[in-house]
Image: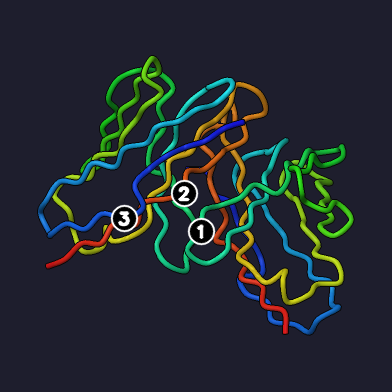
């Protein structure tokens, strides 16, 4: 089977930095994706890591260590609009299906 | 970038009604699309993989006769919730991938409410 673990909730203030960790156990691994979802909305793609290392996209960065079955999403210069749920998702080698973690609810306070 | 369109965005109907949800890839061809279901404050659960020109692959525990999937073209997949009941009320979301199926992009979702 597969499992992904991420914290359920994180609270931070505007301008702060938040790191959301994701550990996974899966038979077969192709890559790790991150999605943002605001209340009532659909998931929006943020980043994808297939290889070890850091991928930077503006204020958001994502990191992957395949040997440690671990990744994280780094949110920098937090803004109020970043309040949302963030999901890590594993893509297995076969089928390209996404298996999602439970999601981390990020609350940004003034 | 890749865009996935889903319609309708919201459906409210009586118990026993069948509801069809459409998912379209607007600027690329998708041989595979995915259907998810999400209950409030929970994660997305994959229901089935929609394969163009062949039968869908359902995840364990998902009733294929309840959730009919048709993927008749490279840009359109449909999910029909047959004889819907209140317990089928949920947020249904489709996704499709770009080259090599990554990254996957999601439609805006359909909020289904069965009275």
Which one is in front, B25 or B112? B112
Q: Residues within 10 Å of mark 2 (few under 14, many from 20)?
A: many
- Residue at horizontal 30 percent and vertical 28 percent from the top: A63
Seen from the viewer's position, the closer of residues A38 and A20 is A20
Q: CA distance from mark 3 to mark 1?
A: 13 Å
Report the residue marked by disc 1. B42
Q: Chain of mark 3?
A: A
- Determine the image quadrant of residue B28: top right
Q: Residue A103: where, in percent of width, then height?
A: 42, 50
Estimate the x, y position of residue B84 in percent, counting from the top left.
80, 72
Secondary structure beneath label 2: loop
For marks 2 and 3, give the CA distance.
Answer: 10 Å
Identify the mark at residue A102; answer none if there is no mark. 2
How many callouts does the rendering have? Answer: 3
Q: What's the distance in space between the residues labelled 2 and 1, CA to CA?
A: 7 Å
- What is the image's colouring? rainbow
User: Which residue: 28% across, 61% down?
Assistant: A83
Determine the image quadrant of residue A74: top left
Q: Are marks 2 and 1 on the same chain?
A: no
Label of residue A9 in the image = 3
Q: Position of residue A84 (x, y in %)?
A: 34, 59
Question: Disc 2 vs disc 1: Cβ atoms closer than 8 Å?
Answer: yes
Q: Nearer the viewer, residue A88 or A81?
A: A88
Q: Which of the chains bears the disc numbered 2?
A: A
Q: Are marks 2 and 3 in contact (CB under 8 Å)?
A: no
């Amino acid at each position: 089977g597969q499992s992904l673990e991420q914290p359920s909730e994180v609270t931070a203030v505007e301008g702060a930095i938040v790191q959301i960790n994701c550990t996974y156990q899966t038979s077969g691994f192709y890559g790790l994706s991150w999605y943002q979802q605001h209340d009532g909305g659909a998931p929006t793609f943020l980043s994808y890591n297939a290889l070890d290392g850091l991928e930077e996209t503006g204020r958001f960065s994502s990191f992957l260590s395949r040997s440690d079955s671990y990744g994280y999403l780094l949110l920098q210069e937090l803004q109020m609009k970043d309040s949302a749920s963030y999901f890590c998702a594993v893509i297995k080698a076969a089928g390209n299906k996404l298996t999602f973690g439970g999601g981390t609810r990020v609350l940004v306070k003034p | 970038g890749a865009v996935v369109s889903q319609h309708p965005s919201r459906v409210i109907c009586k118990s026993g009604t069948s509801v069809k949800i459409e998912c379209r890839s607007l600027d690329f061809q998708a041989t595979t699309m995915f259907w998810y279901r999400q209950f409030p404050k929970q994660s997305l659960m994959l229901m089935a993989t929609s394969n163009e020109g062949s039968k869908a692959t359902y995840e364990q525990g998902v009733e294929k006769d309840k959730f009919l999937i048709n993927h008749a073209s490279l840009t359109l997949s449909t999910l029909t919730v047959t004889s819907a009941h209140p317990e089928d009320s949920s947020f249904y979301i489709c996704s499709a991938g770009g080259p090599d199926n990554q990254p996957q992009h999601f439609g805006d979702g359909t909020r289904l409410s069965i009275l």
